[in-house]
Image (cartoon, rainbow, N blue to C red):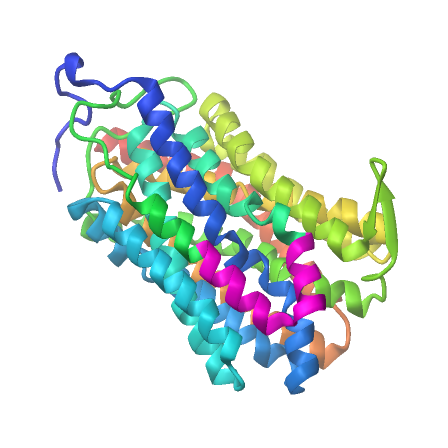
Amino acid sequence: MTDVVHGAAPEASRVGDAYRWTQLAVGVGAMVMIANYQYGWTFFVPDIQKKFGWDRASIQWAFTLFVIFETWLVPFEGWFVDKYGPRLVVLAGGIFCGAGWGITSYATTLNGYYLGMIIAGIGAGAVYGTCVGNALKWFPDKRGLAAGITAAGFGAGSALTVAPIQAMIKDSGFQATFLYFGLGQGIVIILLAFLLFAPKAGQVPGVIQNAAIFQSRRNYGPADVIRQPVFWLMYLMFVLVGAGGLMITANLKPIATDWKIDSIPVTLLAMTMTTVTFAATIDRVLNGLTRPFFGWVSDMIGRENTMFIAFGLEGVGIYMLYLWGHDPVWFVLLSGVVFFAWGEIYSLFPSTCTDTFGPQFATTNAGLLYTAKGTAALLVPLANYVQQSSGQWASVFLIAAGANILASALALVALKPWRKSVIRNA
């Protein structure tokens, strides 16, 4: 553990804000390119099931494996980034992303899909962890906003390709769609990798302290972080909130299909689309907007206060989707609420982690916390098994709603006072 104060270098070595925002924009571009690997998957599931006849739960293990390898390797990739810089890791990530969907395009067995999504997950995790960690380092003065904008690229990045992916699946088949989208996105990531740089000592502002935001002046190494009980509280909360959102992400179209509303036209804001297409498009936009929005809010009113509001809204949204989602219009609107109240975990938790444990090892430490998403993904196939055994989604929705309400309460009752104590003692 080191006690170096971040940002103590001479003021003359500071870079301009334009340079910092340019670095942020490059990271957002790379995040947009990995978005479809997670958020586009739901459109392929029905066609894979139709072609090969496998049960849905078995197919969704590919999604779970993607998320596990996307998240659980981020601490190791983060260590490499903290030591050697972001460029090589993102470059390798682009190669893995393209190769992953290339493999799925030729797969004829479940193991083939599992392998392809594992490789894509490794690539997506390398890009995600690097870009979020870089944002946290470049913007200690706007940490919630910067992490939120970067994560927004991942949340909303697939919004413009919802219709094209579905159209290509319909016209050219899901296998050709896997191939061309996978290769195209991978190539763009590789090109963007050459534009990424990490900040040097003194190039960015120092830590901030005010009534709402409290940041540690001590830099904890990864080995120290995992020995801190408050880290594991954050981890538990991440899993509680993440599981419900991932379940709906993976099963958006299957849920609509089971409720027999997937192909019903819905007209909102002078636009008409089928229920699933409309829901998926709005969801991705809101899932992106929520990350910088709640990140900015957390910079104003504090991380835990923002968690209480957002997680509570998520719990209510999931419950209302269960009650009213059988109506196509309400399905579109309430799934939007669910995604808006879910996506902010990808700005709030990284910024909270770095506030607590310092910026020096931000990529690695935020990566350790990000593995909670992989743990949450293990619950996605479980949700499918519960649904298959009961023939309905009721239990899944009720458990997910309750988990979010619990996390909302923990933010104020446990995390806020505990984290203050840790920073004060440090």
Residue drawn at (50%, 26%), measured in percent from left and top?
296
Viewer-proximal residue, 306 or 284?
284
Residue drawn where x is 27% and y is 55% of the image: 77
Question: Is residue 316 at least partly visible in the picture?
Answer: no
Q: Is residue 171 magenta?
A: yes
Q: Nearer the viewer, residue 166 or 280?
A: 166
For residue 254, side relative to residue 87 (left or right): right
Extent of the magenta region:
163-185
Q: Residue at x 31, y 20 (%)?
A: 208
**Residue 297, x across and y down, in percent:** 52, 26
Q: Nearer the viewer, residue 391 or 414?
A: 391
Q: Report x, y in % for residue 56.
A: 65, 78
Left or right of 237: which side holds 272?
right
Residue pictured at 19% horizontal, 33% vertical? 218
Rendering coords of residue 372 (x, y %): 42, 57
Which quadrant holds the N terminus? top left
From this view, report whether residue 152 is shown above or below residue 391. above
Q: Is residue 266 above or below residue 3?
A: below
- The majority secondary structure of the magenta stretch comes to helix
From the top left corner, tell me how far across and down residue 259 is, in percent.
83, 66
How many labels sit on residues?
Answer: 0
Q: Is residue 261 visible?
A: yes
316 displayed left or right of 191: right
Q: Residue 236 appears in which quarter of the rendering?
A: bottom left
> Magenta includes 204?
no
- Left or right side of 168 for 355: left
